[in-house]
Image: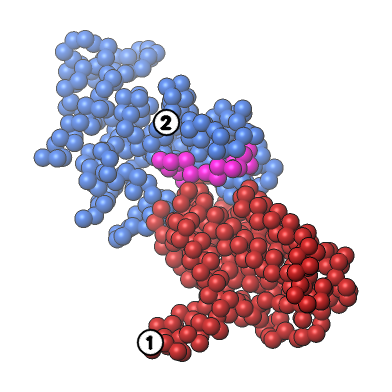
Amino acid sequence: MAALAGIDLTVEAGEICALLGPNGAGKSTLFKILVGLTPADGGTALLWGQPAGSVGARARIGYVGENDELHLGETVQATLSWFARLRGWPAKEAQFQVEKVVFRLGLEASLQRPVGVCSKGTRRRISLAVALLAKPALLLLDEPSAGLDPEAHAHLIQLLKDLRAEGTSILLSTHGLAQIENACDSAAILFRGRIVRSGKLSALQAGMPFEPVFSGQNWTEADREALRLWVEERRLSGNWHRPAGVLESIYRETLQEAAL
Amino acid sequence: MNRLQPPSTVKVLCLVAVRTLAAARRQPSCLVVGILAVGLLGGARFFASFDFGENSAGFLIDFGLAVVFLSGSLVAVVLPAQLWIDEMNQRCAVPVLSSPVRRETFFFGVFFGASAAVGLFLILMFLALGILLSAWADGFGSAAWERLMGACWLTLVRGFLIGALMALLGSFSRSFLFVVCVGAGFVFAGELYPVAWALADDTAYGATLLNPLLFMMPNLGLFGSGSGHILGGAAPPVAALELSLYGAAYAALYLCLGAWIFRSQAW
């Protein structure tokens, strides 16, 4: 039985895509194949037309695995400086880049501490800092919020939004659907090694029995579209919110359909 | 968006080797064995009172070489095993291997870093031994110093060879105990190489079973030195250059095999 088959996933520049699926669906395997940690038994995996896992493809990827696999005895500063050099930054520039990610991830207080004595949340941020040092075009995050407290989680979401605004594509796997749904633009649902549903959240939501959060009335799709156009035409400020729990409902319904 | 060029292979090799060397510095085993060995070397004069009739200089040299041999063997097995297990079992290699780094480069980088750590340990031990012998052993002049440095070189080649075997074991095993036990067994068998050959010839199926295994194993006993050689009374059985090439050939075999296995590892 193939762990993964026929995966065709597009994450556009400056887009956050959530890769969803139950445990064992193949999310981590997909990430590992994309970064070349696990060779595919058969078939081909391509990123930007290059074989996934090739040096050229890996140069454009930042990867954070589900566990923080770092040298525990090394200080945070030494770890980040080393990875900056490994990613190809010249010595002086490497220092500047380290300072940048340290500031961005709020790691100033931990710089001189060994990684091993840092909290789980801090280690998660260090792993993310290592990935960001690559200036990645695509950021692969396997369960990035695991072990984070609510404050750190909110900080992570804001960081992902900032990275999206800078044009970084982000593919992340998570089980915390409610926490991530306001940040992501699209989703792909993986079940038994296959993508059973994928697309923009708005498209996935179409046909689902949900009401817009601002209505409280029985809005049809045409009503929603009319309202959206009305808001756009008048250039009114405001955001179009999805009702909370939509992603989870889409996910549950899709899995039920796929299991049948 | 991405304007970074992956660094050259040589640069990556150096970065990984230096980081491994730094990781070796943090391992307590090296320090503990080093302190014990220096303590034993310092106590050599006390042990010389049990020389059983051998001359004092000869005893001090043999005792010192034995201490360096044992401590060096211990460090050459345990230290690389710890470093490889950190990379494999603690999976510290994952963020590196998901960067634009070739697996073979990483493998050789860790090997060179671990070998450099073992080499530094051996050089320091030989220096300590030389200084003590200069102070205590009669007839230990500049010629004996040179021969001691020759013995140091062969011990370094031996350490490099053991390091290559540990890299081979580390390339696939995720168990510290397995790597240490097999590595120590290899060193032990390598030291008893002639005995193993005799055993293979004497056993009914020995030639069939043991001979292929023995061809994969170098005779580590050749790399040892004694007081006779250091004091100039006896010539070494094999020339240093020949022995270095012999060790390098086996190390190359282990490293190629290790790199090939490491390349296909799934993480």
**Can residue B209 be seen by looking at this rendering?**
yes
Image quarter (top left, top right, bottom left or bottom right) of the C terminus of chain A: top left
Counting labels gives 2
- Which residue lies under the disc numbered 1? B205
Mark 1 chain: B
Image location of residue A93, percent across then percent down: 66, 41
Q: What residue is at 53 percent from the left and 83 percent from the top?
A: B195
Residue at horizontal 63 percent and vertical 42 percent from the top:
A78
In-image side of A159 versus A257 (left or right): right
Quadrant of the image occupied by residue B20: bottom right
The residue type indicated by label 1 comes to Tyr
Q: Nearer the viewer, residue A224 or B20?
A: B20
Residue A62 inside the magenta-drawn segment: yes
Question: Vertically, is A224 above or below A120?
Answer: above
- Observer-nearest residue: A210 or A29? A29
Whole-percent x, y for residue A115 in the image? 56, 38
Q: Position of residue B106 (x, y in %)?
A: 54, 58
Q: Which residues are magenta?
A: A60-81
Indicate which disc residue A147 carries: 2
- Estimate the spatial distance between the alpha carbons at disc 1 and disc 2, rounded to whole Å: 58 Å
The amino acid type of the residue labelled 2 equals: Gly
- B120 vs B127, left or right, is left
Res A234 → quadrant: top left
